[in-house]
Amino acid sequence: MRQKSKRQEKNLAQKVKGRTTLGSGATTVFDKGDVATDILRIECKTTNKKSFTLKKEIFDKIEKEAGLYCQIPLMEVEIQSEQYMIIKRKDFFAIVKPEFVSEEL
């Protein structure tokens, strides 16, 4: 499974024109998260199971790490080779193009 996770991180880093972080997955003082860009700090999770349980504490951890770098926290979850992006609503609207957003939010 670790190989699949590394492949997921590398693929995502290429797609967002970012980089995989140093010590990804480590619990040391290395770079936090799995993938980083100038504005995003992304945590990657993968499973071959039919579901993935997202606990608030997982996203809280990503949010805290992103805050260290003044970045937006994001999570990519791969469930049986299908990728899903998880982002807080306020962060989504901060990065989406204005022409796609109603002012009635």
Image (cartoon, rainbow, N blue to C red):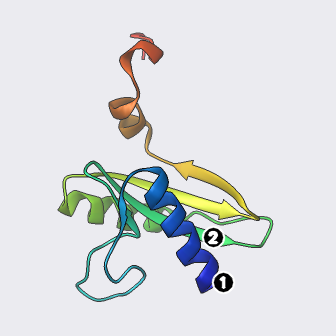
Snapshot quadrant of residue 61: bottom left
In which quadrant is the N terminus drawn? bottom right
Q: Residue, x 69% and y 72% (percent of image)?
A: 47
- Above or below residue 40? Residue 89 is above
Snapshot quadrant of residue 103: top left
Residue type at tag 1: Met
Circles 1 and 2, Cβ within 8 Å, touching? The answer is: yes
Q: Residues within 10 Å of mark 2 (few under 14, many from 20)?
A: many
| Horizontal relation, residue 2 to residue 25: left or right | right
- Above or below residue 23? Residue 100 is above
Q: Residue, x 23% and y 85% (percent of image)?
A: 29
Mark 2 sits on what residue?
46
Q: Secondary structure at mark 1?
A: loop
Q: Which mark is residue 100?
A: none
Residue 40 drawn at (x, y percent):
33, 52
| Horizontal relation, residue 3 to residue 100: left or right | right
Q: Secondary structure at mark 2?
A: strand
Q: Residue, x 43% and y 53% (percent of image)?
A: 74
In which quadrant is the C terminus drawn? top left
Question: What is the total number of numbered labels drawn onto the structure image?
Answer: 2
- Above or below residue 77? Residue 45 is below
Q: Residues within 10 Å of mark 1 (few under 14, many from 20)?
A: few
Mark 1 sits on what residue?
1
Of the pair 59 and 2, the residue shown nearer to us: 2
Residue 6 drawn at (x, y percent):
53, 77
Residue type at tag 2: Thr
- Label 1, label 2: how many angstroms apart (C-alpha)? 8 Å
Snapshot quadrant of residue 97: top left
**Disc nearer the start of the sequence (1/2):** 1
Residue 66 drawn at (x, y percent):
28, 59
